[in-house]
Amino acid sequence: MKSNINFLILISALFIASCGSGENEKTPKVDVETENSFNSEEFDFVLPQPISLAKAFQASGLSYNQSFTNSADNNKKYTTKVKQLLNLGVYSTDLAYSAINEKEQEARAYLKVVQELGNSVGLKPVFSDKKMIEKFDQNLNNMEAIEDLIYDIQEKSEEYMDDNDIRYLAVVQFSGSWTEGMYIGIMDYEAKQNKNLTVTIIDQINLLKNIIKGVKTYPTSDETLTFVIKKLTDILKTYENFPSVKKANESSTFVFPELSKVELSSLGTKVKDLRNYIVN
């Protein structure tokens, strides 16, 4: 049952496939590093790392805006394990978003918060490493090294969760990462009306079925998580019922949906509602 649960997907392949030349299929083609994925009866899917999400949006023209992120000062507000897990995901995306945009001090602040929340949710063996911060500080002017460190942190946490049979924590965390990435992407789209961002937004929607499936494996009943699942399901169903999505799905070959402004506004409202619930 044990397997490496590195969530790394080549998420940019989704973007490339979506702009391809009409392959005879209905969903974007995704290239997956199978040796780094995990498979079991409960986890028969793969999900990307937060930094992969951030890079996918960056490739579509996402620019940096600190007001879109969750303030590092908010982390003390999260006192329940589920809220801490969700916001560990939120802050992981904010960390990646800051790092790939070369915002060194912001990235350092988010790394510290990620470390604190990681310790709180039971990942202390991973996040108590003092060398982590030291290595980060030593490479503040080397964003490539910082990105490698972020990948390393994520891989170590995933391996620890896998080895201790608590991999369901990773999916809850990722649901927070996904929500934050979508929120930042939608906020940036609303500010600039960059149509390229809509392609990446749709790509991320394609992850929702697996996220919902994974979050439902959480072993205990939790009011917060029940609400999050309800909201994620509502986002997915809303998207699937858009006229543009139904029209694309009726095609015998793959056609990428072209969401209308009304549809994007509706989707954005639901994502923002979920994100505000998670961070508040």
Image (tube, rainbow, N blue to C red):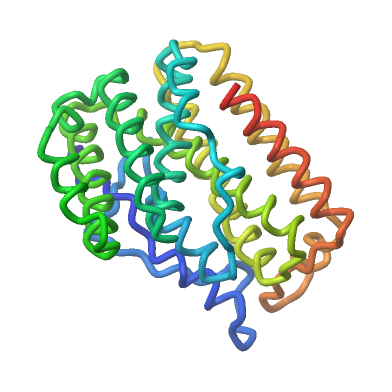
Res. 235 image quadrant: top right
180 to 206, vertically: above or below: above
Q: Nearer the viewer, residue 184 or 258?
A: 184
Question: Where residue 232 sits in the image (x, y, percent)?
Answer: 63, 35
Q: Left or right: 64 with respect to 94?
A: right
Residue lying furthest bottom: 21
Question: Where residue 55 sits in the image (x, y, percent)?
Answer: 45, 63
Identify the residue at image location x=42%, y=21%.
84
208 to 129, vertically: above or below: below
Identify the residue at image location x=58%, y=63%.
62
Identify the residue at image location x=44%, y=60%.
101
Quarter of the C terminus within the rendering: top right
Res. 223 image quadrant: top right
Q: Left or right: 153 with respect to 247?
A: left
Total number of numbered discs in the rendering: 0
Quarter of the N terminus within the rendering: top left
Q: Left or right: 158 with respect to 252?
A: left
Identify the residue at image location x=50%, y=72%.
29
Question: Where residue 204 sits in the image (x, y, percent)?
Answer: 57, 55
Q: Left or right: 137 with respect to 105?
A: left
Q: Nearer the viewer, residue 246 or 190?
A: 190
Q: Nearer the viewer, residue 47 or 97?
A: 97
